[in-house]
Amino acid sequence: MTSTDSAAPAAAGKTHGNEFLYFASRNTKLVIGTVVFVLFLLAAIFGPMLAAYQPMTFDAPPGLPPSAEHWFGTTLFGQDVFSQFVHGLRSSFIVGALGGITAAAIGMFVGFFAGYRGGLVDEVLNMLTNVVLVIPTFAVLLVVAAYLSVRGLGTEALFIGLTSWPWAARAIRAQTFSLTSRDFVDMARLNGEGTFRIIFGQIAPNMSSYLVMTFILLFGGAILTAAMLDFIGLGPTDGISLGLMMNYSVMNAALQLGMWWWFVPPGLAITGIVGSLYVMNVGLDEVFNPKLRAL
């Protein structure tokens, strides 16, 4: 291979990267969604360092509105709402990341192997997917969470990940079916490459954009599911989260008492994070799909 031939793939990759950045930077949905998401992520990372109080300690006057000392006010029990908010943000991102990664890993494994191998493997994996798909997952989460006396973020994320992968598996399976008959896959088979090498070396890279968007949706779905579990009191028993903040505020009549600073910040954060992820997903779809790109 000549130096000119070896430089061609690198030049093509660079051109493709420049093209993606060009359209991504001009896609309003993607830019806005990314900015909102990054702001919440930075608050989750650095916010606890700025909090002057511990989230669950009762060391402030109760029911104070936002002020210079307590940026988001205090709860009915004298807890600093800002401290709870930033620690709750961190918990939401941890659950979203762990739950999304778990669901994506299972969904990709099942989808890739069902779509590539076909036959009996496809039938068994497809049957497993359909079984999990028809199970009322939220009801199962309720039952399991209710019977656990001690619940942590990892346990919650694991349960969410184990029940939210089927739709991703079916979508990846369909995409894999369409790629299995392509020439580059046939060439890899002729070269004697194994199943794992073909799937993760040939098929997966050609689905990279689709996999990224799938993970974003799983990430947002995990955050939303965790917030619902926390809101009904089945969240972590050893910490604080945005959903638990909403739960505590409702249980202690914050709305009736006019303590809006107790439930508005976590509600807006949940809406903002999940909304930004879905807006990012729509923007990425427009960037990756030439037919949807705005001229």
Image (spheres, helix red, strand yellow):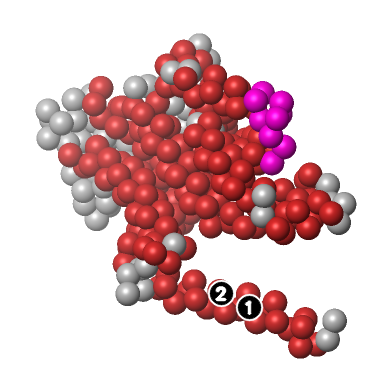
For residue 142, side relative to residue 251 (left or right): right
Screen quadrant of the N terminus: bottom right
Quadrant of the drawing holding the C terminus: bottom left
Q: Are marks 1 and 2 in contact (CB under 8 Å)?
A: yes
- Image quarter for residue 252? top left
Q: Say which of 141 and 255 sits in front.
A: 141
Q: Residue at x 44, y 77 (%)?
A: 22
Q: Is residue 119 inside the magenta stretch?
A: yes
Query: Which residue has dot 1 on it?
Result: 12
Residue 174 visible at all: yes
Q: Residue at x 84, y 54 (%)?
A: 190
Q: Nearer the viewer, residue 289 or 109?
A: 289
Most common secondary structure along the magenta stretch: helix
Q: Is residue 68 above or below residue 107?
A: below
Magenta residue check for 276: no
Q: How many numbered marks have been drawn onto this rendered protein structure?
A: 2
Residue at horizontal 37%, vertical 22%? Answer: 233
Horizontal and vertical percent for residue 242?
36, 37
Q: Is residue 86 positioned above or below 156 on the image? A: below
Q: Under tag 2, what secondary structure?
A: helix
Secondary structure beneath disc 1?
A: helix
108 sits left or right of 145 in the view: right
Q: Nearer the viewer, residue 140 or 128?
A: 128
Coordinates of residue 173 in the picture (x, y in percent): 59, 39
What's drawn in magenta, residue-wise?
Answer: 116-124
Q: Residues within 10 Å of mark 1 (few under 14, many from 20)?
A: few
Q: Amino acid at mark 1?
A: Ala
Q: Mark number for residue 59?
A: none
Name the residue beneath numbered marker 2.
Answer: 16
Along the viewing direction, whichever of 104 and 274 lies nearer the viewer: 104
The amino acid type of the residue labelled 2 equals His
Query: From this viewpoint, is residue 156 visible?
Result: no
